């Protein structure tokens, strides 16, 4: 009866010591979250579609990504949109 208990204790000790060695050898890794720069481009009432397209394309060449377009005056006939962009810092 003592031999099986001794064998179980030895196996448990080996398992725990190998687990402790794995934890000690693991590097301390810190995950860094991506940070973003944001830009809002309001559409002027007199901006034509080609002008807006040219501005958006230029921002794309500079690394900006279009995230969303918001209607500034919902429910009205007046034009007004804001284009929201982001790019990594």
Image: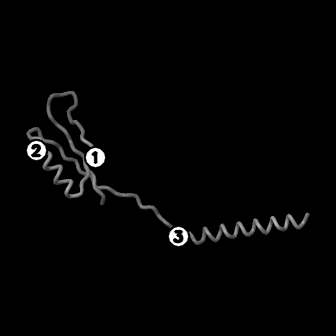
* Front in this rendered view, residue 33 or 17: 17
Q: Position of residue 26 (x, y in %)?
A: 56, 69
Q: Is residue 55 left or right of residue 31?
A: left
In this rendering, position of residue 9 left or right of residue 82: right
Q: Nearer the viewer, mark 2 or mark 1?
A: 2
Q: Position of residue 2 (x, y in %)?
A: 90, 66
Q: Look at mark 1 in the image and give the residue it sits on.
A: 67
Label located before the other in sequence (2 or 1): 2
Q: In terms of sequence position, does the residue under pointer 1 or pointer 3 come before the other?
A: 3
C-alpha separation, residue under disc 1 versus residue under disc 3? 36 Å
At x 19%, y 47%, the residue is 41
Q: What is the secondary structure assignment of the residue under circle 1?
A: strand
Asked whether the beta carbons under mark 2 and mark 1 sit within 8 Å of each other, the answer is no
Q: Secondary structure at mark 3?
A: loop
Estimate the spatial distance between the alpha carbons at disc 2 and disc 1, rounded to whole Å: 20 Å
- Assess disc 3: are there few (<14), some (14-19) or many (≥20) residues with their C-alpha within 10 Å of its C-alpha: few
Look at the numbered disc 2 and give the secondary structure of its residue: helix
Residue depicted at x 69% and y 70%: 17
Q: CA distance from mark 2 to mark 3?
A: 53 Å
Q: Where residue 11 sits: x, y (%)?
A: 77, 67
Q: Tell me the residue that label 2 is attached to.
A: 50
- Label placed on residue 31: none
Where is the N terminus found, in terms of image quarters? bottom right
Q: Dot 3 corresponds to which residue?
A: 27
Q: Quarter-wise, where is residue 77 in the image?
A: top left
Q: Residues within 10 Å of mark 2 (few under 14, many from 20)?
A: few
Decide: marks 2, 3 in contact (CB < 8 A)? no
Task: Choose the circle earlier in sequence order: 2 or 3.
Answer: 3
x 22%, y 36%: residue:
71
Q: Answer whether labels 1 and 3 touch (C-beta < 8 Å).
A: no
* Residue placed most toward the observer, 10 or 85: 10
């Amino acid at each position: 009866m003592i031999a099986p208990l001794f064998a179980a204790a030895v196996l448990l000790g080996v398992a725990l010591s190998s687990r402790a060695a794995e934890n000690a050898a693991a590097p301390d890794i810190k995950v860094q979250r991506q940070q973003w720069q944001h830009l809002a481009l309001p559409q002027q009432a007199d901006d034509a579609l080609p002008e807006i397209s040219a501005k958006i394309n230029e921002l794309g060449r500079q690394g900006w990504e279009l995230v969303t377009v918001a209607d500034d005056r919902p429910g009205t006939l007046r034009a007004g949109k804001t284009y929201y962009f982001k790019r990594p810092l």
